[in-house]
Image (cartoon, rainbow, N blue to C red):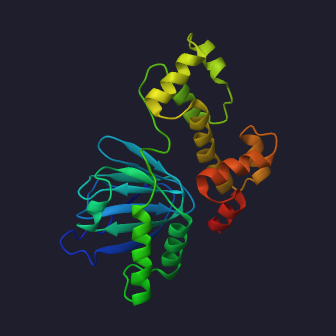
Amino acid sequence: MTTIYNPIINNNNPPDDIFFVHEVFEPDTSTLIHSHYWGQLHFVSNGIIELSTHSKRFLAPPRYALWIPAQTEHKSYIRRSLNYCSMNICPPLSNRLPAYPCLLEVSAIMSAIIEDLRQRQITLATTEQDQRLIKVLFDQVLLCEEHDQFLPTSEDKLLQPILIELEHNPINNQSLVQWAQQLHTTERTLARHYKNKLGISFTEWRQRRKFIYSLQLLRQGMSVNETALTLGYHQASPFITLFKKYAGATPDQYRLRLD
């Protein structure tokens, strides 16, 4: 059963130029479509948030914050429980960030500051120390590397069978050559479609899909070795390298955040 979360929106009276909301969301929680006077940067520390605007669907894992500009209508869905923080940035400060929704790669400094604010449940900077801390955080946000999407999608007819299969069966290890044979095309043509339509290679897309699936397996209590084997790795070390690339932490460090 889906839980509907209604965010408190007081667009006429934001409490400060930058303020925070901390939540622990239960599984199968969704928000109704809404917008804010301010921009929102969505952080999660132990899962994935799914968010949709009128034109795009985003997936944001822990190492990527999701930026939604002011006045942008959006809705979200949380499949599994997670710790959530939104950094709400009012104009004119929000005007210094992109005018469109995107993912921003989270630095180690940003993660540490957000976690400190979450643990202390700081929503407003009421001390000089916290004011300085939030200024550092905002400066770091401005330096973030921007990404269009973590797991891009396409309606390209040649890619659709692959994307649909890997969405439902992320442990499918069929090679691009095998896919090309199945779809009566060439490996070179498929590789070109991936780059042109999705902006990343077939290998990179499949690795990202496996990473997302690994979060689910770890949350279900599966060990790191079991997760690696399930994903098709012969040993844990390549999986750990993959996980650190996207989560900024090892699988064991991620599991500690779930407690």
Count of labels in the image:
0
- Toward the bottom, the furthest residue is 127
Q: Nearer the viewer, residue 241 or 59?
A: 241
Is residue 235 left or right of 115 when viewed as pictured? right
User: Could you tell me which quadrant the C terminus lies in?
Assistant: bottom right
Task: Answer above or below: position of 78 versus 228.
Answer: below
Residue 96, image quadrant: bottom left
Residue 240 is at least partly visible in this image? yes
In the picture as drawn, the residue positioned furthest to the top comes out as: 184
The residue at the point 49 percent across, 75 percent down is 118
- Tell me if residue 52 comes above or below residue 175 in the rendering: below
Q: Residue sitting at 28 percent across and 67 percent down?
A: 93
Q: Give me the residue at 72% from left, 47% from top.
A: 239
Res. 30 in view: no
Q: Position of residue 173 (x, y in %)?
A: 69, 30
Please state the horizontal and vertical placement of residue 134, each as a whole percent of the image. Answer: 41, 76
Q: Which image quadrant for residue 20?
A: bottom left
Give percent across and percent down for residue 79.
51, 52
Q: Position of residue 51 (x, y in %)?
A: 40, 50
Q: Image quadrant of residue 54?
A: top left
User: Horizontally, is 106 left or right of 67 in the view?
Assistant: right
Residues 222 and 198: in front is: 198
Residue appearing at x 63%, y 41% in the figure: 210
Q: Residue at the far right: name it.
A: 235
- Tell which of 220 and 192 is nearer to you: 192
- Vertical position of residue 70 compared to residue 115: above or below: above
